[in-house]
Image: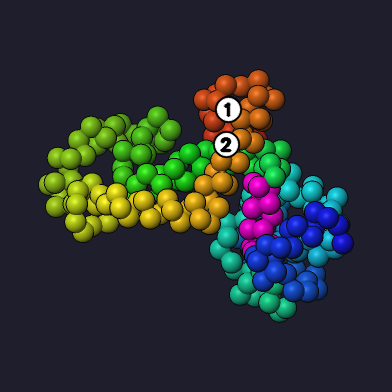
Amino acid sequence: MGALYDELAKDIHLQEGLNACINCGTCTAICPAAGFYNYDPRQIADIVQQQDDKQIEELLKSETIWYCGECMSCKTRCPRNNTPGQIIIALRSYAQEHGYFTQSEKGRQQIYLKRTVGQWILDHGYCLYLEGVGTDNHPEQGTIWDWRQDNWTETMDRLGANYQKAGAGAMRKIPEEALEEVRKIFEVTGGMERFRKIEEYSAQKASEMGLEDEEYVKEVYTTNSSQDNK
């Protein structure tokens, strides 16, 4: 048993996700991601089960652990009640905690997710306000979306939506006291510290690549080599 595996094994996701893989391949057969990527959850379970630090480190630095969509189809079919999806959660968490995520193209995208989805939750709660999906980053929305961006208030009022206002509704304004509770949860559970580490390791990688912060974020958002696509 290696030192790296010992640390990884402390994660409850690994403890509950890996019992005794028999290499039957049922998880790979049912896995949607395996149909699109060079991705084999059976192989991942087997590698981690072997407790070989060298192979585990290669996984942590690879694109592979970022292909899983966490649908948990693997759990529903495994005859030994393993859950490769939970093993992936443990691997991703460790990669974020120790900086391995910056070694892969898909892993580096964590900084974009942190600054969009992660920061949005802290600032606005679960409500996805439509101004957050502009054509600057999503040109596929088209010119009509540009018009809507300039006319949300009028459009939503005509539809009877309670858009960014106090009260009920799917896109209401979340009270500040509720948002403060969310931030406290992130703080107590280590989410804020994880965000800080993602920023720290990403800044180090940007420096290695000779990129300024905005250049780096754009690079990781737009680059897709598709080298492991089937």
- Residue 167: numbered disc: none
In screen coordinates, is 188 left or right of 1? Answer: left
Front residue of this view, candidates 176 and 63: 176
* Numbered disc 1: secondary structure: helix
**Membership of 93 in magenta stretch:** yes
Residue type, numbered disc 2: Glu
Residue type, numbered disc 1: Tyr
Q: Which residue is at a point 23% across and 32% down the rendered structure image?
A: 150
| Residue 84 visible in image | no
Q: Which residue is at a point 27% across and 35% down the rendered structure image?
A: 149
Q: Foreground mark, 2 or 1?
A: 2
Quarter of the image with the N terminus in it: bottom right
Q: Report the predominant secondary structure element of the magenta stretch.
A: helix
Residue 125 position within the rendered picture, expressed as x and y whole percent measured from the top left: 36, 51
- Residue 199: numbered disc: 2
Residue 152 position within the rendered picture, expressed as x and y whole percent measured from the top left: 21, 39
**Residue 153 sits above or below residue 35 on the image:** above
**Membership of 10 in magenta stretch:** no
Front residue of this view, candidates 68 and 117: 117
Task: Report the span colored magenta.
Answer: 85-97
Extreme residue in the bottom direction:
79
Residue 204 position within the rendered picture, expressed as x and y whole percent measured from the top left: 66, 30
Measure the alpha-carbon separation of dots 2 and 1. Answer: 12 Å
State which tag comes first along the sequence, 2 or 1. Answer: 2
Mark 2 in CB contact with mark 1 (< 8 angstroms): no
Q: Residue 206: which quarter of the image?
A: top right
User: Disc 1 marks which residue?
Assistant: 216
* Numbered disc 2: secondary structure: helix
Front residue of this view, candidates 66 and 6: 6
